[in-house]
Amino acid sequence: MILRQWSARIRTADEARYVAYIEETGAAHYAMTEGNLGFQILTRAEPDGISTITTLSWWADIEAVKRFAGEDYQRAQYYPEDDAFLVERTEFVEHHMVRTSQMAGVN
């Protein structure tokens, strides 16, 4: 199993709207892709009025990741309205091989 991690920074005031936007775009794209095992969207507000937003998505294998992101799968995927929200973005995502996992009762 592969964990794909992406992070960016937004204005904290935009957090709820941007999470909804991610659910409509990237998360919906994850869910439609064969081999996606699930995802989470995380936020962390900082005192400076900026929040870090992170998506964690789990994939059956690297081929499933490529079905989502294409052959250049290490590059972050962005959608048209991202520019209206993001104050800082990453060009690349991280991929991790999941060696062990236990998540009882996680929603």
Image: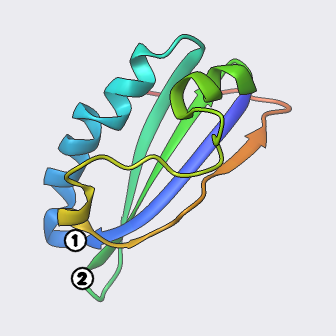
Q: Which residue is mark 1?
A: 12
Quadrant in which the N terminus is drawn: top right
Q: Position of residue 72 (x, y in %)?
A: 64, 42
Compared with 32, 29 (above or below) is below
Q: Secondary structure at mark 2?
A: loop
Please name the residue shown 20% across and 43% down the image: 21
Q: Nearer the viewer, residue 13 or 31?
A: 31
Visual colour scheme = rainbow
x then y, percent, for residue 93: 60, 53
Instruction: Relative to 93, say whether 103 is above or below.
Output: above
Cβ–Cβ under 8 Å for marks 1 and 2: yes
Residue at which label 2 appears: 49
Q: Amino acid at mark 1?
A: Thr
Compared to residue 61, the image places residue 48 above or below, namely below
Whole-Å distance between the Cαs marked 1 and 2?
5 Å
**Closer to us: 100 or 33:** 33
- Kind of residue at badge 2: Gly
Q: Quadrant of the C terminus?
A: top left
Residue 75 visible in the shown view: yes
Q: Which of these two is toward me, 53 or 95?
A: 95
Q: Measured along the vertical axis of the image, is residue 89 above or below residue 20?
A: below
Residue 2 — which label? none
